[in-house]
């Protein structure tokens, strides 16, 4: 399994032509990251590795995001509106000296994404009242001291149906399986491959149109972390990479459409969709979640 582990004296996987120890091993790429010919346009942006000080700052932002999610979790019950959830996130975030990243991002009008039942992601908070049996994903990104962390959880509203329990369990496990592939020497494709293999074995489907992403200095950085794909494909993971893993898993077909508001994404077949997201760091020998919560 470690056939592609990188030695200190091996060529750096970023493509600089330098030895790994003289380049990305120091978490300071000497060169702009150049993708091998044939990689997609979106992979062409530079991967910005994080220093120890950067990681410490993202970890702080991450702990705030998780505290905020716990604050929301305690308030989720039948009768609450998605706008009230947005207000909880907004107020909690600014009271701690942080900024809700979604507010005004590419014109997004609210401070969190709140996605109910067949809403896959980017649900815009509004007057919708949650009812017993709903599932609701709350996706929070906070900027603290200039650093971004991004995480989400899907909660039950009241008592879940068997279908709701099933899709939430499989989405949570999909994130666990994806993160379990994160270590130096594995590739980005290993993450998506593991998620797709697991979710499809369970008879569910993986949404293809959105992906995880580098994060920390900005909301969305290179690289893209697809939640499907081929084992061993894509760029090799190196220490100091920080990115999200955030598989969107549908109980039915993978097809989605965007509503008139230009944001809300729903399943075409009306089936339930669930998502869990964490921001993770590639460490010297594995992975650390910078937005940690239990996935077992
Ligand atoms: N938090 C989302 C993500 O995981 C992005 C939301 S973009 C917004 O990448 F504009 F809708 F907030
Ligand atoms: Co998010
Ligand atoms: Co994200």
Image: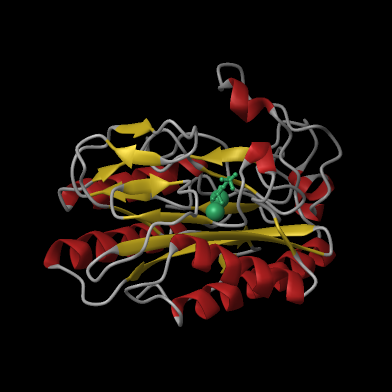
Residue 54: x percent and y percent? 80, 61
Q: Residue at x 24, y 59 (%)?
A: 167
Q: Quadrant of the C terminus?
A: bottom left
Q: Please name the colour scheme applied to the rendered image.
A: secondary structure
Q: Residue at x 73, y 64 (%)?
A: 58
Residue 175: x percent and y percent? 40, 59
As drawn, the residue found furthest toward the bottom would be 74
Q: Is residue 162 visible?
A: yes
Count of numbered tags: 0
Q: Residue at x 46, y 38 (%)?
A: 210
Residue 252: x percent and y percent? 18, 43
Residue 254 versus residue 193: which sits nearer the camera? 254
Residue 50 versus residue 133: which sits nearer the camera? 133
Image quadrant in which you'd find residue 206: top left
Residue 209: x percent and y percent? 42, 33
Q: Is residue 56 left or right of residue 189?
A: right
Q: Residue at x 26, y 66 (%)?
A: 169
Image quadrant in which you'd find residue 228: top left
Q: Is residue 104 left or right of residue 124?
A: right
Q: Is residue 206 left or right of residue 234?
A: left
Residue 220 versus residue 38: which sits nearer the camera? 220
As drawn, the residue found furthest toward the top would be 38
Is 36 drawn above or below residue 179 in the view shown?
above
Is 157 drawn above or below residue 247 in the view shown?
below
Q: Is residue 194 visible?
A: no
As drawn, the residue found furthest toward the right would be 30
């Amino acid at each position: 399994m470690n056939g592609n582990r990188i030695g200190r004296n091996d060529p750096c996987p970023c493509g600089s032509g330098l030895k790994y120890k003289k380049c990305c091993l120091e978490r300071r790429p000497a060169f702009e990251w150049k993708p091998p010919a044939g990689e997609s346009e979106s992979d062409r942006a530079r991967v910005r590795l994080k220093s120890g000080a950067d990681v410490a700052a993202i970890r702080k932002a991450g702990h705030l995001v998780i505290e905020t999610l716990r604050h929301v979790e305690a308030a989720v019950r039948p009768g609450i509106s998605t706008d009230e959830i947005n207000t909880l996130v907004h107020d909690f975030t600014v009271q701690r000296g942080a900024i809700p990243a979604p507010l005004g991002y590419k014109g997004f009008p609210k401070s969190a994404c709140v996605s109910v039942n067949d809403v896959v992601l980017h649900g815009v908070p509004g007057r919708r009242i949650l009812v017993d049996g709903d599932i609701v994903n709350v996706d929070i990104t906070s900027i603290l001291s200039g650093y971004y962390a991004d995480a989400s959880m899907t909660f039950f509203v009241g008592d879940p149906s068997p279908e709701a329990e099933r899709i939430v369990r499989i989405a949570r496990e999909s994130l666990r399986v994806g993160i379990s592939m994160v270590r130096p020497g594995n590739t980005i494709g290993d993450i998506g491959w593991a998620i797709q293999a697991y979710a499809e074995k369970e008879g569910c489907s993986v949404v293809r149109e959105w992906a995880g992403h580098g994060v920390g200095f900005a909301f969305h950085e290179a690289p893209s972390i697809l939640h499907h794909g081929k084992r061993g494909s894509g760029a090799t993971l190196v220490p100091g990479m920080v990115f999200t893993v955030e598989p969107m898993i549908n109980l039915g077909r993978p097809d989605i459409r965007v509503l008139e508001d230009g944001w809300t994404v729903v399943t075409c077949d009306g089936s339930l969709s669930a998502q869990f997201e964490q921001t993770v760091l590639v460490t010297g020998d594995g992975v650390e979640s910078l937005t940690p919560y239990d996935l077992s």
